[in-house]
């Protein structure tokens, strides 16, 4: 059963869209000038403090329909401030509630939801076989419309065994799971576990565009769905999580060191330009 959304862009069906960006020149990043900041968390506070409860709730449990191997908790050892202005989501190798690993998955459901605009976060990723960090958006009507009719926007997800590549993807009715529209972005040098990077989407009536550090690498418009339904016309909420194992990445192996941490410097959401 799919519970609270699904992640995994297994087939890069959005490559043609990405090539169109490359051949026509990347659209300039509109940035945040003149926008209204409507949600932010800078994660300031003492080490060990839990995320602000007025902004974030928790998904407690395991699997979530993706074959994940961790049990997600609300414990500070899995999700808390690091005292240096970051949120640390930490995956541990430990026996807990029948699972061999623990981690965390937090969301703004019922606390902050928005249709369209700019959603961005500055994140330093973990590394290693079986690590699956993600920053994503899920339709706020998930409980009534169910997935994938509610829609899903993966702003960033990464296979820990490929530390220089992230993916952005779009899931909806008729283009979900392995059939999602998706594209990769690869660093020209370095890896995503070596430093912080800014991951963003610009979501308008006309399209959704993905950026890494201000560089656009994929844009999808309703016409690109070729008759399939565009469901990105209602509020979505934000999710941050670090999964262990699952269909998208496979299980950890002997090369995977624990603990692994996804460090989030900030999350910011702006209203769409008028």
Image (spheres, helix red, strand yellow):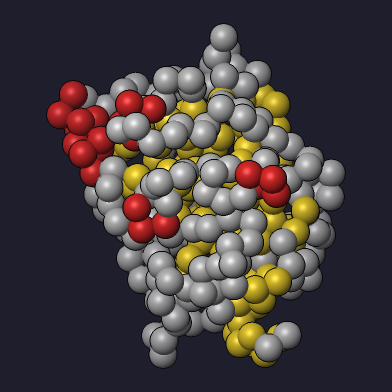
Q: Residue shown at 42%/20% (left/top)?
A: 206
Give the image location of residue 176, x and y in percent.
42, 51
Q: Residue shown at 57%/51% (left/top)?
A: 147
Residue 136 higher or lower than 217, as above or below: below
Residue 173 higher or lower than 105, as above or below: above
The answer to which image quadrant residue 193 occupies is bottom left
Depth check: give the residue in front, 73 or 198.
73
Q: Residue shown at 76%/49% (left/top)?
A: 56
Depth check: give the residue in front, 271 or 175.
175
Residue 144 higher or lower than 126, as above or below: above
Give the image location of residue 253, x and y in percent.
41, 86
Outermost residue to the right: 54
* For residue 26, side relative to residue 254 (left or right): left
Can residue 186 be seen from the camera position used here?
no
Q: Check the picture and name the quadrant holding the N terminus.
A: bottom right
Residue 185 higher or lower than 113, as above or below: below
Give the image location of residue 271, x and y in percent.
62, 21
The answer to which image quadrant residue 190 occupies is bottom left
Depth check: give the residue in front, 32 or 55.
55
Q: Residue shown at 62%/50% (left/top)?
A: 146
Give the image location of residue 145, x and y in percent.
63, 44
* For residue 24, side relative to residue 60 (left or right): left
């Amino acid at each position: 059963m799919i519970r609270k959304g699904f992640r995994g862009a297994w087939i890069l069906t959005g490559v043609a869209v990405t090539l169109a960006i490359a051949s026509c020149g990347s659209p300039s990043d509109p940035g945040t000038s003149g926008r209204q900041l409507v949600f932010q968390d800078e994660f300031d506070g003492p080490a060990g403090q839990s995320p602000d409860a007025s902004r974030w709730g928790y998904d407690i449990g395991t699997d979530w329909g993706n074959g994940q191997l961790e049990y997600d908790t609300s414990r500070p050892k899995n999700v808390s401030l690091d005292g240096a202005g970051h949120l640390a989501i930490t995956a541990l190798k430990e026996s807990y509630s029948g699972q061999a690993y623990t981690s965390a998955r937090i969301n703004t459901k019922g606390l902050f939801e928005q249709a369209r605009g700019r959603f961005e976060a500055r994140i330093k990723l973990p590394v290693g076989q079986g690590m699956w960090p993600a920053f994503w958006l899920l339709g706020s009507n998930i409980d009534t419309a169910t997935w994938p009719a509610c829609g899903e926007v993966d702003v960033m997800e990464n296979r820990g065994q490929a530390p220089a590549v992230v993916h952005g993807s779009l899931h909806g009715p008729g283009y979900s799971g392995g059939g999602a529209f998706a594209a990769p972005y690869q660093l020209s040098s370095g890896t995503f576990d070596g430093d912080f990077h800014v991951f963003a989407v610009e979501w308008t009536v006309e399209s959704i565009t993905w950026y890494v550090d201000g560089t656009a690498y994929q844009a999808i418009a309703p016409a690109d769905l070729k008759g399939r339904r565009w469901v990105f016309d209602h509020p979505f909420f934000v999710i941050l999580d670090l999964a262990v194992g699952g269909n998208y990445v496979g299980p950890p192996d002997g090369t995977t060191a624990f603990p692994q941490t996804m460090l989030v410097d900030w999350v910011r959401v702006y209203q769409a330009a008028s």
